[in-house]
Image (cartoon, helix red, strand yellow):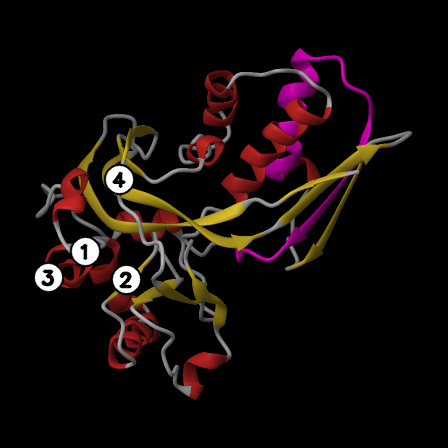
Amino acid sequence: MITYYPNAKINLGLSIVGKRPDGYHNIETIFYPIPLCDSLSIELAQTNGFKIHGIAIDGNIEDNLVMKAYRLIEKDYKIPPISIILEKKIPFGAGLGGGSSDAAYMLRLLSDYFKLSISNDQLEHYSSTLGADCPFFIKNEAVFASGIGNIFESSSISLKGYYMVLIKPNVAVSTADAYRMVVPAKASFDLSQLQSLSIDQWRKFIFNDFESSVFTKYPLIASIKEDLYASGAIYASMSGSGSTVFGIYKKAPNITSMLQSDIVWQGILS
């Protein structure tokens, strides 16, 4: 058996800059990897099998991005049946990219386990067919993302040594609804230049365009962001279209009891 640990990401700023003719939206954001991880294991088996532990995931197994990743490789390479075990810790529908990460790591896992020697470029190509942000998790480094979240430029942003708290309330935000509620506009700040600002300045310049509409519909999420700032965060934001909110601190904070039950991860970033 071989095990990899697909990690989550957060969005540092998110500008929705235009509606495309194909119905999608062009965005600008920073994808930043964080240490909240699932566990993904495979081993040889007589027949294919897929077990999911941890956070329950409804739906047909074949619709899971992990299985879709397996089918992509199976189609192009002669690989034997395997048993797949996914321990789900990254909440889904949370703006953290957990499903995309699982898919990208599955591609890497299959390439390494079966010694297929698939290049990163080819892995990114495979993953691009599974989701716009899937290719990010192949190299898993901070990037400025544009287009539909699928065009990447390397970013020098580092949060090493800062403390982070992730809060995920029991609220589900539909990404489609979030996009419908927002009006595209030119970004107020060029996120590709985020490294020119100190983190202490982010609160004044860096925004997630989804927040205005999502906070109106789900005031609980807005109150969580306010509570994170009240607890000493130097920057707090909703990630993606929500509903996870993160706070960045210079040292471990004293989180209010109201937020404690909804913490999905906290710790020092490396």
Disc 4 residue type? Ser
Residue furthest out toward the bottom? 257
Question: What's the distance in space between the residues labelled 4 and 2, CA to CA?
Answer: 20 Å
Disc ID at residue 156: 4
Circle 1 Cα neighbour tier, 10 Å, few/some/many (<14 / 14–19 / ≥20): many
Disc 3 residue type? Lys
Question: What's the distance in space between the residues labelled 3 and 4, CA to CA?
Answer: 20 Å
Q: Earlier in the sequence, mark 3 or mark 4?
A: 4
Residue 133 lies left or right of residue 204; in this view the side is right
Q: Position of residue 62 (x, y in %)?
A: 68, 35
For marks 3 and 4, give the one nearer the viewer.
4
Circle 2 Cα neighbour tier, 10 Å, few/some/many (<14 / 14–19 / ≥20): many
Residue 131 lies left or right of residue 41; in this view the side is left
Q: Earlier in the sequence, mark 4 or mark 2?
A: 4
Disc 2 residue type? Ser
Question: What's the distance in space between the residues labelled 4 and 1, CA to CA?
Answer: 19 Å
Circle 4 Cα neighbour tier, 10 Å, few/some/many (<14 / 14–19 / ≥20): few
**Which residue is identified by label 1?**
207
Q: Position of residue 47 (x, y in %)?
A: 87, 30
Secondary structure type for disc 2: strand
Circle 3 Cα neighbour tier, 10 Å, few/some/many (<14 / 14–19 / ≥20): few
The segment highlighted magenta reads 64-92
Q: Is residue 166 above or below residue 140?
A: below
Which residue corresponds to the image point at 39% horizontal and 62% vertical from the top-left? 243
Secondary structure type for disc 1: loop
Please tell me in which quadrant of the rendered image residue 102 appears.
top right
Q: Earlier in the sequence, mark 2 or mark 1?
A: 1
Disc ID at residue 204: 3
